Image: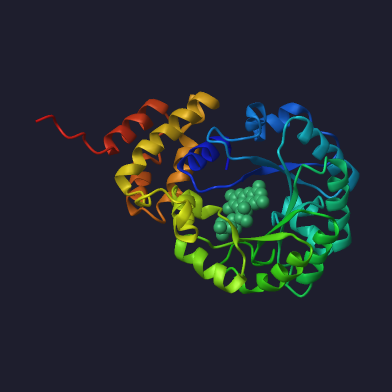
Amino acid sequence: MDSIMRAMLTGMGGYDRCVTEFVRVSQTVLPARVFHRLCPELLEGGKTPSGTPVFVQLLGSDAPLMARNARAAVGLGAPGIDLNFGCPAKTVNKSRGGAVLLKTPDTLRGVCSAVRDAVPPSIPVTAKIRLGFDDDSHFMDIVAAALAGGISELTIHARTRRQAYRPPAHWSRLAEAVDMAAAAGVRVIANGELWSPGDVLRCRSVSRCRDFMLARGSLCRPDLGRQVRAQLIPETAASPPPAPLDWPDIPPLLRSYLHRNAATYDARYACNPLKQWLVYLQYHYPQAGALFAKVKRLRDFNDMDRALVAEQPALPTAA
Ligand SMILES: Cc1cc2nc3c(=O)[nH]c(=O)nc-3n(C[C@H](O)[C@H](O)[C@H](O)COP(=O)(O)O)c2cc1C
């Protein structure tokens, strides 16, 4: 997700941290404008408007070059660097980035330690891995390599690269990694198929993780972060705990999203991200599917805006 979605979701609460889309590192130290495009929050202290830190994610296999790019991102104000060893895309893997590094734990360790050494100790360097490439037989070697590289937190997408995004996620495999990482003082963050607070509770009990990364689920349920937090750590929730968002709460968010996209990018392209969000929202709100069918052919900002206004519940008339 981009900075607009990060701002919307973190504004609703529940999130401790965001990570950018990956910045692909292949041949050079990227100019500031590339970092700013993927992480405009760098111009605002490295935080979303509601104050959630945003780590810059780097993807690549050339350890010295990854280190130089990490230093550049930190120089621009990144509060942390996350390293992507999970991306399954063929084009990315062919150029030796993302999940393909799970096949060569030594290279993965080299990237982690080069980046760790390149940035000040006060800047966290975190990594994201999967259970393996084709299968999970080397999972613990991969975890050991990331830990040996000196990372400070490890997010694990509980599937192999071959399993791509197909359910289920194998949360129970994370428990062993939690023990190994704890011995090094590192927390494991569980990721994969967390669509509801119930999923997070089940994942917590089988993985023994205490921290969770929400991905597609946060797009389907914009208040998932604060709902999860209210169930996991009730003492931190507002009192009374926030009611889950209902469909009538969603069209105003959609409209705000459309307007922010138009203001940030170009009104001509603002309809596309909105349609993409509706595709996710329909998994939790069937009404979003009906709205998508109505607007999928709209390309004009004003037409889309009118369709969203029509979707908003009428205000009660004054007595
Ligand atoms: C369209 C799309 C783009 C993604 N881009 C990234 C990315 O840039 N960096 C990353 O670490 N993960 C990326 N992911 C993976 C998610 O962060 C997450 O690991 C994965 O979707 C599993 O979590 P989920 O089942 O909760 O969605 C992406 C996933 C999707 C579907």
Residue ranking furthest to the left: 319
Residue 118 shown left or right of residue 161 in the figure: right
Against 208, residue 110 (above or below) is above
Total marks shown come to 0
In this rendering, the answer to whether 258 lies above or below 292 is above
Residue nearest the viewer, comparing 139 with 116:
116
Q: Position of residue 107 (x, y in %)?
A: 88, 57
Q: Position of residue 5 (x, y in %)?
A: 52, 39
Q: Position of residue 252 (x, y in %)?
A: 35, 36
Front residue of this view, candidates 162 and 61: 61
37 is higher (above) or lower (below) than 195:
above
In the depicted view, which residue is nearer to us: 297 or 256? 256
Q: Quadrant of the C terminus?
A: top left
* Residue 76, visible in the rendered structure: yes
- Left or right of residue 199: residue 310: left
Residue 270 percent coordinates (x, y) = 48, 31
**Residue appearing at x 72%, y 27% in the figure:** 33
State the image quarter where residue 23 is shown.
top right
Residue at x-position 48% and y-position 29%: 260
Q: Quadrant of the N terminus?
A: top right
Report the side of 316 relative to 285 (left or right).
left
Q: Is residue 162 left or right of residue 273?
A: right
Q: How is the image coloured?
A: rainbow
Q: Residue at x 45, y 34 (%)?
A: 257
At x 46%, y 52%, the residue is 224
Q: Is residue 196 visible?
A: no
